[in-house]
Amino acid sequence: MAQTNVKTLDVRPIEPREKHPAIFTNFDSLAPGEVLQLINDTTPNRYITRCRQKEAGSLTGNILRKVL
């Protein structure tokens, strides 16, 4: 079984104006088959939507856990 490379990015301590660039810089650096695990203090629906639009259907994403 092939091992999946998971990159984890915790944006909770990042200033709000810096979160967007940090997320997309990391997303854009992914190789095919790699996973970006995003840890955020809000539901990242707009980021997931934008990533799916950029990748024209070749992206899957799930919210693994929502903690309030």
Image (cartoon, grey):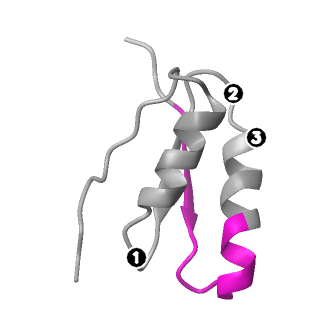
What residue is at 52 percent from the left and 20 percent from the top? 58
* Secondary-structure class at tag 3: loop
**Residue 67: % across, % down:** 23, 76
Between disc 1 and disc 3, whose residue precedes?
Answer: 3
Asked whether residue 4 is drawn in magenta, I would say no
In the rendering, at what x and y percent does residue 26 appear? 71, 51
Rendered location of residue 64, percent (x, y): 27, 53
Q: Which residues are magenta?
A: 5-20
Label 2: few (<14), some or many (≥20) within 10 Å? few
Q: Which amino acid is tagged 3?
A: Ser
Q: Earlier in the sequence, mark 1 or mark 2?
A: 2
Q: Is residue 16 magenta?
A: yes
Q: Which residue is mark 3?
A: 29
Which quadrant is the N terminus positioned in? top left
Circle 3 Cα neighbour tier, 10 Å, few/some/many (<14 / 14–19 / ≥20): few
Give the SS element for disc 1.
loop
The answer to which quarter of the image holds residue 62 is top left
x and y percentages locating residue 44 in the rendered image: 44, 63
Inspect the image, locate mark 2, and give the three-letter code of the amino acid beneath it. Ala
Question: Alpha-carbon distance for marks 2 and 3?
Answer: 6 Å
**Crowding near pointer 1: few (<14 within 10 Å), some, many (20+)?**
few
The residue labelled by disc 2 is 31
Which residue is label 1 attached to? 42
Q: Is residue 51 above or below residue 25?
A: above
